[in-house]
Image (cartoon, helix red, strand yellow):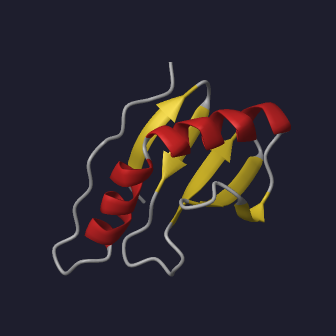
């Protein structure tokens, strides 16, 4: 699974040919979550409140890039671009 970003100990990944709605996977210590790109809401799993807020702010800033990555990873020739971390 491609790692598209890492910040504050949070790892953001996307699978190729993953299911809709457009989303990404988050790993933080022992926590795992799937976050919908459009809403920033957790579809599955859990994260501590502070890390969820970081992820939601980052998602909102980079929503367009995230949707492009999701669509690119679903194409015949899968590719992705790294996304700038939250600073």
- Is residue 77 positioned above or below 46 on the image? below
Q: Position of residue 80 (x, y in %)?
A: 26, 55
- Name the side, left or right, on which 45 lies relative to 86: right
* Residue 41 location, quadrant: bottom right
- Name the side, left or right, on which 35 lies relative to 81: right
Q: How many marks?
A: 0
Residue farthest to the top, as pictured: 87
Residue sitting at x 44%, y 67%: 15
Q: Position of residue 42 (x, y in %)?
A: 73, 60
Name the quadrant of the N terminus: bottom left
Residue sitting at x 53%, y 44%: 60
Residue sitting at x 62%, y 40%: 55
Q: Position of residue 40 (x, y in %)?
A: 64, 54
* Residue 44 location, quadrant: bottom right
- Name the side, left or right, on which 40 lies relative to 77: right
- Is residue 64 positioned above or below 60 on the image? below
Q: Position of residue 70 (x, y in %)?
A: 38, 65
Residue sitting at x 47%, y 38%: 61
- Is residue 56 positioned above or below 15 on the image? above
- Is residue 82 positioned above or below 41 on the image? above
- Name the side, left or right, on which 87 lies relative to 41: left
């Amino acid at each position: 699974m491609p790692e598209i970003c890492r910040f504050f100990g949070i790892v953001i990944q996307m699978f190729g040919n993953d299911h809709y709605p457009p989303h990404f996977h988050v790993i933080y210590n022992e926590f795992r979550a799937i976050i919908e790109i459009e809403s920033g809401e957790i579809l599955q799993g859990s994260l501590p409140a502070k890390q969820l807020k970081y992820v939601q702010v980052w998602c909102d800033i980079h929503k367009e890039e995230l949707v492009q990555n999701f669509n690119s990873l679903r194409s015949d020739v899968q590719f992705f671009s790294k996304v700038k971390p939250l600073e």
